[in-house]
Amino acid sequence: MEKPGTQEVQKTKKLDKLEVKQRLLTVKKLPSQPQVVREIIKLWRNPNVSMAEYERIISNDPGLTSEVLKIVNSPYYGLKSKVTNLRIALTMLGLVEIYRIVANVNFYKVFRSMFNRLSYDFSVFWKHSQMTANIAHYLANNFIPEHTAEAHLVGLLHDVGKLVMEQFFNDEWQELMLRLEQYKKENVAVEEEIYGLNHCEIGAILLIRWNIPKEIVIPVRYHHTPLEAPEHQKLALVSYFAEKIATYRMSEYDQHMIQEYFSEDKMWQTLSNKYPELNLLNSPEKLNEINLTPF
């Protein structure tokens, strides 16, 4: 977010939790599930999708084809010669990486087109989402290897509630940004003071409306409170650590270009002690293994 300045916080009336939920369920402009999201979920649901099927999907989208070639030729892969053939690029990347690229590119398009009246820099939101997704994928690969694709999706979607809050509750959003800048508190606590609920809950409402499977919705809903997750708690834990680590890394670059503040609160300390393998802040050499550069 851009620095909001030093103006005094003008408090608005706190919204009622039920009122917010009802408004979200009845707002006609709240986006319905796009076709491309259904396709992404379908691909995720079927791990036996062939390379040929991915090639067919990607080749029908010139923008996506261009993005795949751009990524495979990026410094991250360190290729000695430039790849210009889609099939060769896909073979080099592998199915897991291809899925991640398809999800990243298409969710970017979905969010950018649906939430097109934002008052803050969307690129900051998306950079944080991708960084969280990449870290979540890495953590899941070691912690719950059978759920790396889910972890990546949760990372991409975990903060979608913020887009809803800003676009459909803009007055309250402006107050939220001012309070975060003034008090440097964990954003969830401030959100609940203003909205009556937080971006995790609001994001889950949208994802349910989109018929996103509960394996994704529940970790999104509990990515700030993973021990409260009724199911899929390990995914929620991975999402919690990934989000916290991404927030910390972004805050290293510019305190005024983030939408959250990192805090070593009681929960962080408790979970870091219980799951030290998930706290990459204590293992900088492992953190350096992750591609933190957004696609």
Image (cartoon, helix red, strand yellow):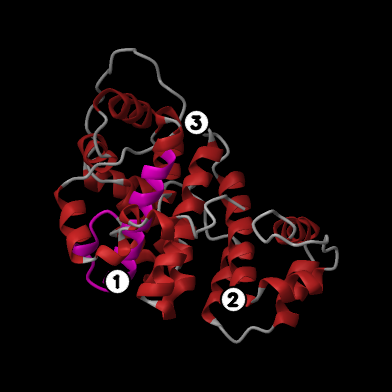
Mark 1 vs mark 2, foreground winner is: 1
Amino acid carrying mark 1 in the image: Lys
Q: Is residue 161 above or below residue 123?
A: below
Residue drawn at x 25%, y 63% as measured from the top left: 276
Is tag 1's residue or tag 3's residue first in the polypeptide sequence?
3
Q: Quadrant of residue 158?
A: bottom left
Amino acid carrying mark 2 in the image: Leu
Verify whether residue 230 appears in magenta: yes
Residue at which label 1 appears = 234
Residue drawn at x 73%, y 59% as measured from the top left: 64
Residue at which label 3 appears = 120
- Residue 42 lies left or right of residue 265; in this view the side is right
Residue placed furthest toward the top? 7
Q: CA distance from mark 1 to mark 3?
A: 32 Å
Label 1 residue SS: helix
**Label 2 with label 3: CB-CB less than 8 Å:** no
Label 2 residue SS: helix
Question: For this rendering, which residue is in front, 213 or 239?
Answer: 239
**Label 1 with label 2: CB-CB less than 8 Å:** no
Residue placed furthest toward the bottom? 48
Circle 1 Cα neighbour tier, 10 Å, few/some/many (<14 / 14–19 / ≥20): some
**Label 1 with label 3: CB-CB less than 8 Å:** no
Residue at which label 2 appears = 43
x, y percent for residue 212:
45, 67
Mark 1 vs mark 3, foreground winner is: 1
Please name the predominant secondary structure of the magenta segment in the image. helix
Q: Is residue 187 above or below residue 24?
A: above
x, y percent for residue 8:
29, 13
Amino acid carrying mark 3 in the image: Tyr
